[in-house]
Amino acid sequence: MNYLPDVERYAKMQYRRCGNSGIKLPLISLGLWHNFGKIDDFENCNKVLQTAFDNGITHFDLANNYGPPAGASEKTFGQIFKNNFKDYRDELIISTKAGYTMWEGPYGDFGSKKYLVASLNQSLKRMGLDYVDIFYHHRPDPDTPLEETMSALDLIVRQGKALYIGISNYKPTEAAKAIKILKGLGTPCLIHQARYSMFDRWVEDGLLDVLQKEKVGCITFSSLAQGLLTNKYLDGIPKNSRAGRNLKNGAITKAQITEGIIKKVKLLNELAKKRDQSLAQMALAWILKDGRITSVILGASKPAQVTDGINAIKNCHFSKEELDKIESILKK
Ligand code: NDP
């Protein structure tokens, strides 16, 4: 293990308490949905993770199905963890999830106890870990009783395979129900993981209120709208960008990058310049201005994107005029 993390790393980041728990998360976390698959350059993955940790990012977010192929991101992470971070395990919050299709047959999807327990066992093997810090149910299951799914999460914690439990993509009413069941089981819900960006604001419609009332943390994803809320697509679609790579599995497509959207992005970019921020920084800061948000999970295909994103935390304050301007741009 030759890697020595920056000794100043904790001075570079700020941390927020996650709901009513003992855990603090960095304002910016790092996600491994894309850029850590078999198709990606291993040395670049290594550098992205090192850059993150060197800047005080203590939280890495994974899922069973991240790749491609599914499982590959956990494998890549496992190798890099072994080479670099083994000695720093107690400084890290590592999360994974299950909920989307993972293997063939009736037991490799959604929210049965059978699926969740088996999937986490597989994830731990791929990552070479004894436990994860947070295990999430990745999406609600319309058919399995919520009691079964929540009792699977409770079991996993009692087995010592996860320290904390989270839910993801649950609507406000479903989230409230899940939180109540988990409370009854004695394994409180730590956190909800939700998509939230200037372009996708569904969490403002009830979810954030539920989480605040229940003192559950909120961690957001795709807060750069998969790269749209950066300067990347201002002059066309670069070949090596997420949209340009024609990826599958929910990745942004060329068709989603319309003239109308780019018009808004250009106006937002002008406002970001006036704030002395890159557009990516302003988009992340705009999420973090709300104290109910514990952390934003950033996706990054290069180390420079990590360092750019992290600088968002230097200015998360918006004047009323700036907020009004953003609203008027988004409504155009
Ligand atoms: P983002 O919205 O942060 O998009 C990340 C992409 O934006 C990067 O891959 C890169 O694109 C581009 N980018 C990042 N920083 C910059 C920059 N400074 N300048 C220019 N471009 C930049 O988030 P993701 O959609 O990747 O999601 C983040 C994480 O959230 C995931 O990795 C995962 O952990 C989690 N997630 C959870 C989900 C759930 O259902 N619970 C669903 C989706 C994500 P490019 O590759 O083109 O360079």
Image (cartoon, helix red, strand yellow):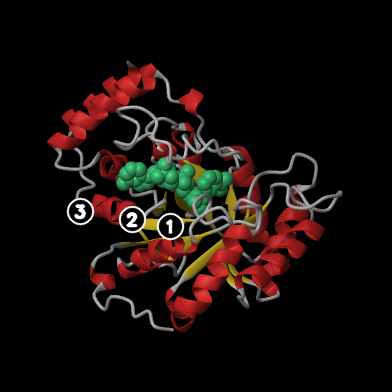
Q: Position of residue 6 (x, y in %)?
A: 28, 75
Query: Image quarter for residue 321?
Result: top left
Task: Give the position of the C terminus as an image quadrant.
Answer: top left
> CA–CA distance between discs 3 and 2?
14 Å
Name the residue that disc number 3 marks.
Answer: 314
Q: Position of residue 117 (x, y in %)?
A: 75, 64
Q: Is residue 248 above or below residue 129?
A: above
8 vs 231, nearest the viewer: 231
Label 1 residue near ligand 1, CB within 8 Å: yes
Which three-letter amino acid code belongs to the residue tagged 3?
Lys
Q: Is residue 89 above or below residue 46?
A: below
Q: Position of residue 32 (x, y in %)?
A: 51, 55
Name the residue that disc number 1 marks.
Answer: 30
309 vs 92, nearest the viewer: 309
Within 10 Å of the Cα at label 3, are there few (<14), some (14-19), or many (20+) other Cα atoms? few
Mark 2 vs mark 1: give the one in front.
2
Which residue is at 27% across, 45% downward? 281
Which residue is at 73% across, 61% downward? 119
Label 2 residue near ligand 1, CB within 8 Å: yes
Q: Position of residue 162 (x, y in %)?
A: 62, 70
Q: Earlier in the sequence, mark 3 or mark 2?
A: 2
Name the residue that disc number 2 marks.
Answer: 306
